Amino acid sequence: MDFSTLASTMQALESTRSRNQMVDIIASLFKQLSPDDVQRSVCLLQGVVAPPHKGIEVGLGEKLVEDAISKATGYSSKEVEKLYLKLGDLGSVAEELCKGKKQTALFSQTLSIEKVFSTFYKIATLSGHGSQDVKISMLAELLNNSSSVEAKFITRFPIGRLRLGVGDPTVLDSLSVMHRGDKSDREILESKYNICSDLGLIAKTYAQDPNSISKFTMVPFTPIRPALAERLPSAKEIIEKMGPCTVEAKYDGFRLQIHRKGKEVEIFSRRMERMTNMLPEVVAAVRDELNCKDIIFEGEALAYNETSGEFYPFQQTMQRKRKHGVGAKSAEMPLRLFAFDLLYLDGKDMAAKPLRERRKALESVLLKNSKTLSLSESYPVKKPAEIETHFEDFISRGLEGLMAKDLNAPYTAGARKFAWVKLKRSYRNELSDTIDMVIIGYFAGKGARTKFKFGGLLGAVYDPNTDTFQSLAKVGSGFSEEQMQSIEGLLSKIKTKKPNARINSIMEPTYWVEPKYVLTVTADEITRSPIHTCGKEGDSPGYALRFPRMYGELRTDKRAEDATTTDEILEMYKMQKRTELSKEGEE
Ligand code: ATP
């Protein structure tokens, strides 16, 4: 199919903020395409050429793209730069200059979706001596053959500025609407996406035959979206909700999903990015110290001091997330992995089996004396008092709290369910859990902060039902001066003139930014507020945070869509009310 069809879809998406309209626009595009083009278009609409676990990114610098525009249109670099300064967007520059191309290609051809996709894929995978020039020529060739509207989107794509606001739920809904006319297949599509993490592949399979989607199964080296934990405020409520269960130590490190097939090993992060090269000791242990052939399992990794046997604090563990000096750091602070769940074993999908069975199988494959791999601590409990005893014990040993788990529950890929419940220490006058917000904008500094051009952040939570980011709080404290400077540096690169189509906010920051970075905040409580859109319906107020402050560093292990959700805030608000009532009862 011609790329112009996709370009006009992009144009239409750019001019709407209604999600239902977006879904209809994308569904009617899909209807016109072959399954292969559906797959390619899903990627192109989302600004990628492959799912995140493949680690293939286009990422061209602006300068290279300017060179390509100049090469394709015949305008000098100076002219291109001048217009960029005026318009502030390279896409508009290309659009403008392609209207009045000084040179036309001798053999210009109509661009197809396949041609555009495969060119970007090649650009992403080319490396080595002289590759820059080849990349510029490839991009220039595309621009040479494109209309002005096509040129706008082709230019924005490689610099990560497409910003059409097409999130995963929007694509899943659009697929369902393409075949069914409504969103009734969204659930099955989502459940398959949760075990395969390749939205393009799901889209292609579904476009070929909606019934074939049920055949998707787990396979090593394709990451599974992680199961997540719910919250409850007390041991008593945990037993009321779950009955007899098991409690595990809650380790404060980073979550790993480990895949092994024969002697080959791959390790993925919480956001399903490949981390294999960063963790040599874990790779070696998984290869040599497991009693099985093929496996997918999960655990939490923490750095520890071999001499004293103590764990390092979270900030130090995070130093292991690095691309350079891996060997030296791994010798200095080796990791210990506490395995807590098993998803796949020697050809068998274990996810549907109850935790009790998964755990037993996991125990049987782990070797007893491994320095690197061990089972997470776990204790069966029946009464609140037993939970409290373990909780106190974990806290006194510097752990974060506990995870209560339902021994009869399956692994709930990609979902936050009551199969797992986290209980963390709650400090007086503080929410019992931190909140992860997406930064959607920031404010210019006043007074002492003017020199950093930074006066606080506008944070939002994610609503997967509407695929939007809803504002929850303005965060103005908790940062060090260094943090302020580095955050302002990051944000200034992703400023946008208008808010992204997925942002829903009444409050206007000085600068809007792409929803990309996630920060953790603590707060005193959740309140109702008319100025924030989280959970806001009609005229009723939304939800907000009282005295929010930044906690720790930016959460680079989370994507914007992994932020706390609107429903979680509503649940936490109800929990807070229940806790207040029971406190009043005690007084
Ligand atoms: P989430 O991952 O749920 O979005 P989060 O990253 O803020 O939220 P928490 O909500 O505090 O983390 O807790 C869940 C995380 O706890 C898991 O993702 C995992 O990394 C970690 N964890 C530590 N110990 C365990 C355990 N025994 N079982 C399961 N998860 C554990």
Image (tube, rainbow, N blue to C red):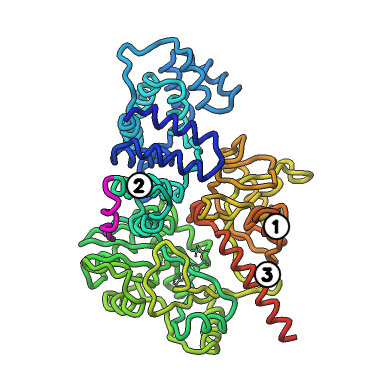
Check disc 1 and give the amino acid type: Ser
Ranked by sequence position, the earlier of labels 1 and 2 is: 2
Image coordinates of residue 398 in percent, x first then y, are 54, 75
Q: Which mark is residue 179?
A: 2
Magenta stretch holds residue 413: no
Q: Secondary structure at mark 3?
A: loop
Image coordinates of residue 198 in percent, x first then y, are 34, 50
**Magenta residues (range):** 208-220
Find the residue positioned furthest to the right: 447
The quadrant of the picture occupied by the C terminus is bottom right
**Mark pair 1, 2: CA separation:** 37 Å
Quadrant of the rendered image containing residue 30: top left
Q: Which residue is mark 3?
A: 430
Q: Nearer the viewer, residue 385 or 552?
A: 385
Quadrant of the rendered image containing residue 297: bottom left
Q: Is residue 554 above or below residue 399?
A: above
What is the crowding at mark 2: few (fewer than 14 residues within 10 Å), some, or many (at least 20)?
some
Check disc 2 and give the amino acid type: His
Marks 1,3: beta carbons within 8 A:
no
Going 59% across and 42% down the picture, which residue do you hit? 513
Horizontal arrangement in the rendering, residue 518 relative to residue 360 (left or right): right
Q: Is residue 393 above or below residue 557?
A: below
Going 62% across and 34% down the picture, which residue do you hit? 497
Q: Which mark is residue 540?
A: 1
Horizontal arrangement in the rendering, residue 177 relative to residue 400 (left or right): left
Check disc 3 and give the amino acid type: Glu
Quadrant of the rendered image containing residue 49: top left
**How many numbered circles does the render carry?**
3
Image coordinates of residue 389 in percent, x first then y, are 54, 87
